[in-house]
Image (spheres, rainbow, N blue to C red):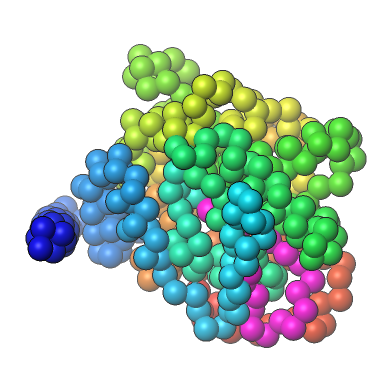
Amino acid sequence: MWSSIKSFYRKGRFFGRLALVILTVSVRRILFGPKRRCWSWWAEVLISFIQRTRNEIQDIPLLRRRLDSGRAVPKWVKREFRTIRQDPPLNALWLVPSTIKQPQRCVIYLHGGGYCLGSLNSHQRIAALIAHTSEAAVLLVEYRLAPEHPFPSALEDALYSYDYIVTSLNFSFDRVVIAGDSAGGGLSVATVLALRDRQGDLVNPKLPAAVVTLSPWVDLTYSLDEILQGTERHLYSSWFSNAETDFLPLDNLHTFSKHYLGDVDPKHPLASPVYAILTGLPPVLIQVGTAEQLYGDDIHFAHKLREAGVEVEVEEFFDLPHVFQIFGSRVFPESRKAMESIGRFIKKHTYGIDDVSIRMDNEAITSNL
């Protein structure tokens, strides 16, 4: 009885907030136009609603339940649940385009969520789209989350997943790409750094063919007090200038980093890759929106990669927020272009195999994004 009342209250509160956001956005757009020129009505409603409810980000169990609802995998991608390690358990989804009989390239996808959120359900759609556009198998990894499993649990799971792909599934390392969004983007870079250091070769290590990052979170060192006092403010200006157009609350991300790091130094290079020695890394793709709060951090990280001699492609998407790709092309039409670009980048850097059996109609690819 009491649980039913609480459930009814939560649903009523949810729809009440949504109705208020719809009304507010509609009136504001009539009077003043869109908040950002390229934003559709749907996009502005979505961002405004997340901003209005983001204080609940402190309630990690609640957010996990909401995100776990996820989006269904498209019918043109085959899905297989796998347990790739028993103790501690490590689960994954194996996603393969239905037109591919024997995948010749593989993408390990590490989901975002501030190292505290995210699941197979929450990110299966975007992982499936990457499988589709890159004509590759994708292993979506459900790595262990903080605060129950702090650093380096997520990194250990990512490394185990790579070893599983190379040793158990017999993919050549130069046919493997590691990808991720937000925290998963930072974890992707950290995984490649750990693989390089494990081999002890900074000049010619046998590493994955490439790294794909969507709005990667690569610097967990920031102190809220220092930022507000203006320390190195030129690096963090997007935290302030884009506060009204993004949905990442800085103070809550600070809480997430505390959950993940525990007592570990936030400048640990495998937690904050921006402080690592970046020499010898494979090509890196960084997609970032100019309206997101991580914009400055990601551009700074790209400069650090170039200084280390790493091949970097940076794709800036005007006026778009954090990990806009995950919302799909109906909300942000630019998502289609972003996903197609990811597919091209992955195929470019895993080129050299016999692709005759896995060719797909480009029209079929784009029409499903």
Numbered range of the magenta stretch: 94-111
Classify 263 as above or below 253: above
Classify 20 as above or below 137: above
Percent coordinates x, y for residue 213 in the rendering: 59, 49
Residue shown at 65% from the left, 75% from the top = 96
Residue shown at 52% from the left, 83% from the top = 75
Percent coordinates x, y for residue 284 in the rendering: 69, 47
Residue shown at 41% from the left, 52% from the top = 320
Considering depth in this image, is 4 or 245 the residue closer to the camera?
A: 4
Q: Is residue 313 left or right of residue 121?
A: right
Q: Is residue 210 visible?
A: yes
In the picture, which quadrant includes the N terminus?
bottom left
Considering depth in this image, is 50 or 94 the residue closer to the camera?
A: 94
Instruction: Count how many numbered circles sit on residues in the image.
Output: 0
Residue shown at 86% from the left, 70% from the top = 353
Q: Is residue 30 visible?
A: no
